[in-house]
Image (tube, rainbow, N blue to C red):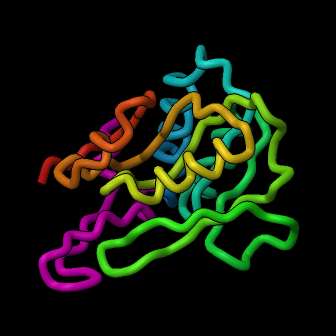
Amino acid sequence: MNLREKIREIPDFPKPGISFKDITTLLKDGDALRETVKRMAKHFADHKIDMIVGVESRGFILGAPLAYEMGLGFTLIRKPKKLPGEVLKVEYDLEYGTDSLEIHSDSFPPGTRVLVVDDLLATGGTIEAAIELIQKLGGEVAGLAFLIELAYLGGRKRLLDYDIYSLVQYDE
């Protein structure tokens, strides 16, 4: 199945010059969603993963069924003030300012091998922050899984120490 054909591109959204990659068209196709999850599970089957971590918010949509498929637990990395328990927080730089992410401090014990899941790899800044949170908890990042990679933005170059798997790549 060609998953790229299942992703709708919306020109000039959210602003002129941007070609938005809309995954809702893939998600509403049960066969395409199932194929996405199965391909990710197959790639990481031999990585001895203990936990799946989904990055807000579309990482939840892909991470939870992947955890189910692999028979693993699932936990969340969220924007600030969305998690009710005690959290660890990391700030990271954006092009014009900063943002932050949080994880529950009891999400998993030290030594846990974690697969980080998100819908999109762009510049890599959000994923670097997610990795930092996982490491603060004593976790080991076993891999990074994405539905889409915007290769032209160079995020992969910032994450060379990790096994990165993306199902659909855009070179421009």
In this rendered view, identify the residue nearer to me: 58 or 26.
58
* Residue 145, percent from left and from top: 48, 39
Q: Residue at x 41, y 33 (%)?
A: 165
Q: Is residue 4 magenta?
A: yes
Q: Quadrant of the N terminus?
A: top left
Magenta range: 1-26
Q: Residue at x 79, y 59 (%)?
A: 104
* Residue 161, percent from left and from top: 41, 29
143 relative to 13 in the view: left or right: right
Residue 164, image quadrant: top left
Q: Is residue 121 above or below residue 14?
A: above
In this rendered view, identify the residue nearer to me: 123 or 25.
123
* Residue 33, percent from left and from top: 52, 47
Q: Is residue 154 magenta?
A: no
In this rendered view, identify the residue nearer to me: 53 or 93.
93
Residue 47, image quadrant: top right
75 relative to 125 in the view: left or right: right
Q: Quadrant of the C terminus?
A: bottom left
